[in-house]
Amino acid sequence: MFSGFMVNAWIVATIVAVVGGAVGFFVVLRGSAFVAHAIPNGSFAGAAAASLIGINTLIGLGVFALGSALGIGLLGRRGRHDVATALTLVFALGLGALFLSFTVEYAPEIYSLLFGEVLGISGNQLGPTIALAAVCLAALVLLYRPLLLSSTLPDSAHARGIPPYTAELAFLVLVALATTMTVPVVGTALIFSLMIGPPAAARAFTTRPLAAVALSIVIAVGVAWAAIALSYQTNWPVGFYVGVISAASYAAGRTWTYARTRRPRKRHRVVVEAAFTP
Amino acid sequence: MTLPGPAVTADPVAAHDAVEALRVDGVTVRLGGRTVLDDVSFQVGAGEFTGLIGPNGAGKTTLFRVILGLQQPTSGSVRVGDDRRSGRDVGYVPQKFLLDPDMPLRGRDLIALGLDGQRLGVPLPSRARRARVQDMVEAVDAQAFADERVGRLSGGEQQRILIAHALISRPQLLLLDEPLANLDLRSAQEVVGLLSRIATEQRIAVLISAHEMNPLLPVMDRVVYLAAGHAASGTAEEVVRSDVLSRLYGHHVDVLRVHGRVLVVAGTGHDEHAPLDDTGDGSAPVEIV
Amino acid sequence: MHADLAAIIAPGFFSSSSVRLALVVGALVAIVAGTVGVFTVIRGQSFAGEALGDIGASGGSSAYLAGIAPLWGFVGISVAAAGVMELIGIQRARGRDLATGIVLGAGFGLAALFLYLGTLSSTTGATVTILFGSIFQLDTSILPLVAVFGAVALVTILALYRPLLLVSVSPELGAARRLPVRLIGGLYLLAMALAVALSAVTIGAILSTALLVGPAATALQLTRRPGRAIVWAAVLGVGAMWLGILLAYDSYDWRPLHHGWPVSFFVVTLVLVAYIASRILPARSATRRG
């Protein structure tokens, strides 16, 4: 499984996991699992359109991921955020169904777009994928501090010059960017599992933010490699393994948390005698 | 309309500090047809502990937002320190905050975010940074829990972390929005004691909003009483008086002092033994200690 | 006049039995989905609805593998998934999004597997049918099933109407009145599972949320009163469904491939357009006091 034509798969799987695991840290921090599910599925229409027109899939993915992100941001600003996310998502999926109905043999195409294909990336896409990943990671590094502050203490961030809406938009665009290059191979339907399972597990095992990011990446890479290997062996879709193994990592994290909080924590309480105020 | 209070105290140290920490000048805010704040003016000197007292809905949070630069006043101005108001020099502890118990963030990390959280990039580990954070941890007495997940701490502990987060950038002014509202009596006393110490030792002006002034009476240098959008400022003896508050509220209000505590009561105005419940003058609150 | 009508409604529309069946089934489903959906929006559970739809795809695809009607699979898995979500505490606010997403990922992953196995036995498999619906290929035997499942969902909602409304708006108030908040929430999840499963049969598993959430969200923009919103949601849902069916039928000759555009695309687009229109057009001054 490490022969020539699989090399691309391994490289891309690693990139996907690193980017997904890193961005996923913020997805979980902000409680935005639905958004992480919606944006990649929205990009599905873009991939369908790209193959229809005959341009690079990445361009289609990128445009529609960004469009979904902005749609969710705009519609969700005043109204119900979850409704905006749901409707943007299904509309984008409906568009995807439409575009694919314009092709002749569209069932297999839908399938691999949604659920991934081990050999789903061609050699000439590798370069742009690596470049995009570098940009995404650079953006993440730049946005790390202000996004962390805004995600945990939005009022304090606002007072320091970071309005919550700006942070939300930046986050949405970041997810769109991450989606664009992570979807091939894993598929639009299940890439989000990589962005929520591993980070959820990671934060159970550490209390420090940067360590949580690193651990999230490590777990995501593990999940992705296992998924590629198993998919290669059994021919079952990559997306299936990603979904199921991510769920297992989440369960592991949750079990660990449960086990730890049962033990009484030892703390040295400093007792302060309050002065009596008449 | 702001009723005249005395000028800044005659304390020689304060007079030496030529610059007030906060100067609010004729701030009026009209929102949606309602005048939320009407010509509010007051000053807070360096190191002064000031209470912004008033019933809920009086405009305290709006005033805070104006001071922080999050709300533009319809007229009037706000100056923090010697700059034209810049949001950076004000530390802010909001009233509501929700910290996820599963979040991978220690109290220490949250405090560190107060140092440079708004700057781009990833914080590089540095001894100086760690030392400053540790100083703040000790200043707010949080050594026992600074390394725990901040979302798992109690309300009072979280608040101390947030105070450290607000203070670490060495602001000239510290704003706290209703910090005592959800605390039990002992925690409230601890927090008040801590803030008073900080104000004095670090010469930071502290402005606390509260609808219940009694826990603050022992430590307040100055009161700014806000009712129906109008403010009066001065010492507690000068401001918390029946005639002053009645003019603020726009209807008769009695101020009773019982064992050193203050009771603000709505009354009919004819009767000295005013009934404790509001008999229909309006919506003045009854504060019972 | 006759010529105009013929231009809008392509010939053979009303005489086609599959169209007639689609209209009836579509209307029934839209009414159920709209009714249940009003509470979905009030409770902020769009993600849970979306999750049930996607997980339902694994039911539909396994039913296809087993050779039985997909509706059974949709219903069975959705209901089971609702149970699982209830067990892992989807009703508690903390970690709710995350848990929903994880279950969704695992369930949808299973759907991927079953759909793949389906392609092993037949060349096209069931991907398009299960995921995007096939309302013109329904069998008349589905009608009584839709009626029964739909009735169960509607009766659940209507029987629980007042307590459900109370605990949806304020769980604390409900608990104070000694209402079994958790049980009500669980029964509601059940009704939502049925509504989503029915919706999946018409416009596909991954698009089913559109019928659940879209008309309801639009209705709640038009009125604050839940009773009226339910009526509006049903009307809007049926409208979107019928118009979608009509357009899909008319599109049979359209480019590029002259085999028609998908019904689900039209329905979902109409639903979204209605929602955006209700957000942009300020027609709500009278109901602000409601």
Image (cartoon, coloured by chain):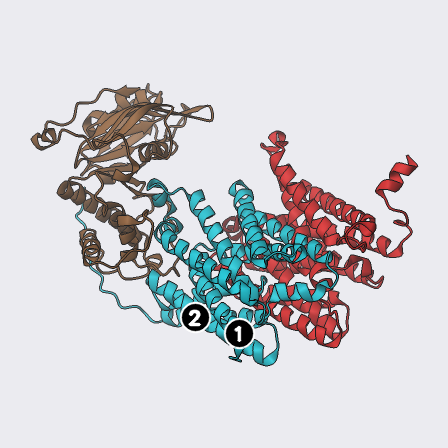
Chain colours: A cyan, B brown, C red
- Tell which of A8 and C284 is nearer to you: A8
Q: Residue at x 59, y 53 (%)?
A: C46
Q: In the displayed structure, does residue B130 sit left or right of residue A211?
A: left
| Residue C226 in view in this figure | no
Binning the other alpha carbons within 10 Å of mark 1 as few (below 14), some (14 to 19) or many (20 upward) gives many
- Tell which of C203 and B263 is nearer to you: C203
Q: Name the residue under label 2.
A: A219
- Tell which of C143 and A10 is nearer to you: A10
Residue A203 in percent (x, y) is at 39, 64
- Tell which of A65 and A149 is nearer to you: A65
Figure check: A149 above or below A254: above
Q: In the displayed structure, does residue C281 sit left or right of residue B181?
A: right
Residue A124 in percent (x, y) is at 54, 64
Residue A184 in percent (x, y) is at 56, 64
| Residue C266 in view in this figure | yes
Quadrant of the frame with the N terminus of chain B: top left
Figure check: B84 above or below B137: above
Q: Which residue is drawn at 43% across and 56% down?
A: A135
The disc numbered 1 marks a residue on which chain?
A
- Which amino acid type is marked by label 2? Ile
The disc numbered 2 marks a residue on which chain?
A
Q: How far apart are marks 1 and 2 (CA)?
A: 12 Å
Quadrant of the frame with the C terminus of chain B: top left
Q: Quadrant of residue B6?
A: top left
SS of the residue under disc 1: helix
Figure check: A27 above or below A116: above
Q: Mark 1 points at which residue?
A: A227
SS of the residue under disc 2: helix
- Which amino acid type is marked by label 1? Ala
